[in-house]
Image: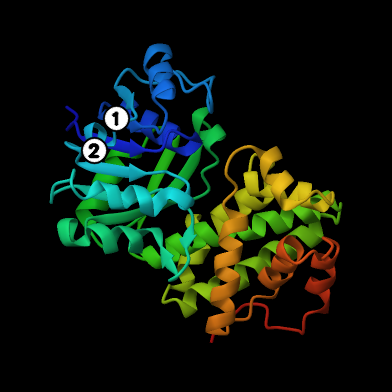
Amino acid sequence: MINTKQVAVLGGGSFGTVLANIAASNGHEVRLWVRDADQALRINSEGANATYHPELILSDNISASEDLESVVSNAEYILVATPSLIFEQIIARLAPYIHSSVSIISCTKGIQPDPFRTMTEIISHHLGHIIGNQIGALSGPNLAKEIAEQKIAGTVIASSNSELTSNIKLILSSSTFKVFSSSDIQGVELAGALKNIYAICCGIAHAKNVGENALGFIITRSMAEMSRFAVAKGANPITFLGLSGMGDLMATCTSKLSRNFQLGELIARDISLLEAKELVGQVAEGARTLEVVYQEAQTSQVSMPIVKSLYNILYKGVKSEQLLEDLLDHPHEVDVEFTQ
């Protein structure tokens, strides 16, 4: 018999909706927080989130609400799947409503500037005095549309709390969605955020019809850059060989379902960043993450030539063709770092 958990999912977008549905389909009581009362009403009356997944019939165990207090007050697990831009604002609002035994898991792939912080560091800063180490991060090659269609996918739950990782595996695992564990929270989070930058690059390259060899070149050099930056921030480079690293990088850099890949394709057509964001429609985190990582790499003196090249294209008016020239013109580097 299932040990039913009270689960709150914050964010009624693509990923939040599919996570809520997996947990609810596993028999757990799920409350889904959305920012709009009309959206909550439609979800509850129609049994679907027509804005993001009109084809997905939601479990009866899901109830949606715009009232944050009612959604989280009795929750045992809170999954936060909001855009990074509002993540800290939402986390700060939780303090009066949660109890000491709740676990909070970031499902948002982003980084906050001023100062540089991951999403779990934001959770710890605002709520660590209440929940201690009951904090985790969920990340992997998780294109929400494919998960909604019950295509096979895997993800990683990272936490220093073994009970949390065990329970998240039970709550979210299904016949088509496999959950693995990691203790490297920093590595898993940074991998999930950084790969969005390189997905934009691959979208540009794909639109330029550079060929498969060049895309393989870009992806592997992206992996070198990602891991170099993450190690400077205390992560384990081996983490980047897993689902949250290479797995997510491959999926996001090669799929037209990726919003960041779509953004890159539009940039390659000399469409402005603002217009490209509007055409993509949903939030593409890579452009925002790029600004944060570029500044931090400069401060930390970490070599990130691809990040620098893309930054110049998106924010300094450099033509998108320069990306490929910069890849070839950069001084020779070792192929694989951290092997000695």
Q: Where is mark 1, residue-wise?
A: 31
Examine the image and state in which quarter residue 319 appears: bottom right
Q: Where is mark 2, residue-wise?
A: 72
Residue 150 in percent (x, y) is at: 50, 29
Q: Is residue 303 above or below residue 131?
A: below
Q: Earlier in the sequence, mark 1 or mark 2?
A: 1
> Of 19 and 236, which appears nearest the observer?
19
* Residue type marked 1: Arg
Q: Residue at x 48, y 35 (%)?
A: 13
Residue 18 shown left or right of residue 205 in the figure: left
* Residue type marked 2: Val
Label 1: which secondary element: strand
Examine the image and state in which quarter residue 321 appears: bottom right
Q: Residues within 10 Å of mark 1 (few under 14, many from 20)?
A: many
Label 2: which secondary element: helix
Residue 68 shown left or right of residue 111 in the figure: left
The CA distance from mark 1 to mark 2 is 8 Å
Q: Residues within 10 Å of mark 2 (few under 14, many from 20)?
A: many
